Amino acid sequence: MSKEQNLKTAALEKISHLDYFNIAISVDCVIFGYDNKELKVLLIKSDLEEFSGLYSLLGDLVRPDEDLESASYRVLRDRTGMEDVYLEQVHTFGGLGRHPSGRVITTAYYSLIDIKHHKLKLNHNDLHWHSVNDIKELAFDHKTILDTCLCRLREQVMDHPVVFNLLPEKFSLRELQDLYQSILDTDLDRRNFRKKIAIKGWLVDLNEMENNVPHRPGKLYALKKQHHRKGPKTLVLE
Amino acid sequence: MSKEQNLKTAALEKISHLDYFNIAISVDCVIFGYDNKELKVLLIKSDLEEFSGLYSLLGDLVRPDEDLESASYRVLRDRTGMEDVYLEQVHTFGGLGRHPSGRVITTAYYSLIDIKHHKLKLNHNDLHWHSVNDIKELAFDHKTILDTCLCRLREQVMDHPVVFNLLPEKFSLRELQDLYQSILDTDLDRRNFRKKIAIKGWLVDLNEMENNVPHRPGKLYALKKQHHRKGPKTLVLE
DNA sequence: TCAAAAGTGTTGACTTTACACCCATGA
DNA sequence: TCATGGGTGTAAAGTCAACACTTTTGA
């Protein structure tokens, strides 16, 4: 609590910042996908000796010339080849011991992508989809980060039209309900679920039918254009 | 996307980190108080020439040997002299141009304190309480940070017993209702409000009465011990 | 004709809102 | 005696949860 009352210039203050330029900042992306009625997350085998054999989230250090969102999008683009994905900041983890090679503070984002749309890219370097429910341990504090992001996702799904990023453009209400059940890890009543979704007004009826299903085909729906969105709901005050 | 498949040691990776050790990280605290039926926030006159005349939130660079929460608590302790305050991380702001003296990424916390309990400390260095509703402009991106934190506070108040940190230990239901009205910026029906609060079961009836009020005194209540909490609700999965 | 899922409404329980009167106190 | 807020209940509207049968398709 120094008491110099005169104004500092930004240039002067910069000098004192230098003392603190030894903390690195990274982003970590919890990239969710959905396949075979299971919520998945994209993980890579850790390349750190300390975590040999463990998987970790996809992340990278933030570069001096990019903001946090850009860094997250870069990680996503590099790893999945996808642009225009849904991405939302969740929490920043800054514990002292969280990275063995030094002080690294990381900002966690979760992302929702249609697992079918990336496929081709990078099945090399031990990049794989893992069922969220099967994950017991991850490198660093990544299990905590995953849990935190999953928790946030669950909080959002009923109030915001986000999960559609996990589905192909056209989908049936059954597929949508299965997805909700996977995310929330509960069973939902079919009639009540359909009513609830109908009331939200998120969907447009395509007047098309499923095909190649071994039972009565259902109608296909799509998310209304106005609800397509990469980022989170914009904050509304008042 | 290099393809070296051999494991790096943490020591080796550290070298590549050095390239990125030129981003500083700070915390900024949105310290809310409540007085005279208004929600207040603690601000300090900016000591940067670039923002001469503007106020800013209280923040500081994160030191290499402290985690983010510790840094926030340090800021709070230094500025208000209070320990054991309620503190919750809200969002991390990492835009490129947000700080004139260089790249500074900041993690925002909001805090709730009983405005009566700090008083003494630091009325020097242009530290003052400002009515949240009157704030039009702040230094840096601090207006955005304030708005984001206010929004988060509003989302939390009805579901979590947090606002009691803004009140003295003993309070009447009228005081509590006034506080909610200030935060939410709406009028609430008295009977419905009391019912809603009663159902939550957060309060204990102290069997004491207000005094020194120029009207019929009301009963005094306190938050039940089990709901006292410094941090946010712990995340509950499953 | 069977198996699988589509599609569709109603009832009761509960929650939320709107609303008005008498009471206790200090000035 | 007046002004101020304390304290209280009910009815109507809306929301939520539980629940079953008929239909369509492919195998």
Image (cartoon, coloured by chain):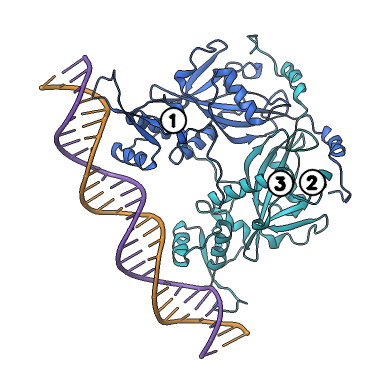
Chain colours: A blue, B cyan, C orange, D purple
Mark 1 residue element: helix
Which chain does the residue under circle 2 lie in?
B
Residue under numbered circle 2:
B51
- Residue B65 x %, y %: 76, 35
- Residue B217 x %, y %: 55, 76
Which chain does the residue under circle 3 lie in?
B
Amino acid identity at mark 1: Phe
Side of B5 relative to B126 (left or right): left
Q: Residue at x 55, y 59 (%)?
A: B180
Q: Using the image, tell me which numbered label, if any, was put on residue B205.
A: none
Amino acid identity at mark 2: Phe
Mark 2 residue element: helix
Side of A204 relative to B112 (left or right): left
Front tag of 1 and 2: 2
Q: CA distance from mark 1 to mark 3?
A: 40 Å
Q: CA distance from mark 1 to mark 2?
A: 43 Å
Q: Residue at x 25, y 19 (%)?
A: A214
Q: Residues within 10 Å of mark 3 (few under 14, many from 20)?
A: many
Residue under numbered circle 3:
B73
Mark sitting earlier along the chain (3/2)? 2
Q: Residues within 10 Å of mark 2 (few under 14, many from 20)?
A: some
Q: Are marks 1 and 2 on the same chain?
A: no
Vertical order, A76 against A234 (above or below): above
Say whether residue A45 is visible: no
- Residue B181 x %, y %: 55, 61
Residue under numbered circle 1:
A164
Q: Are marks 3 and 2 in contact (CB under 8 Å)?
A: no
Q: Residue at x 53, y 60 (%)?
A: B186
Say whether residue A47 is visible: yes
Q: On the rendered image, what quadrant is the N terminus of chain B found in?
A: top right
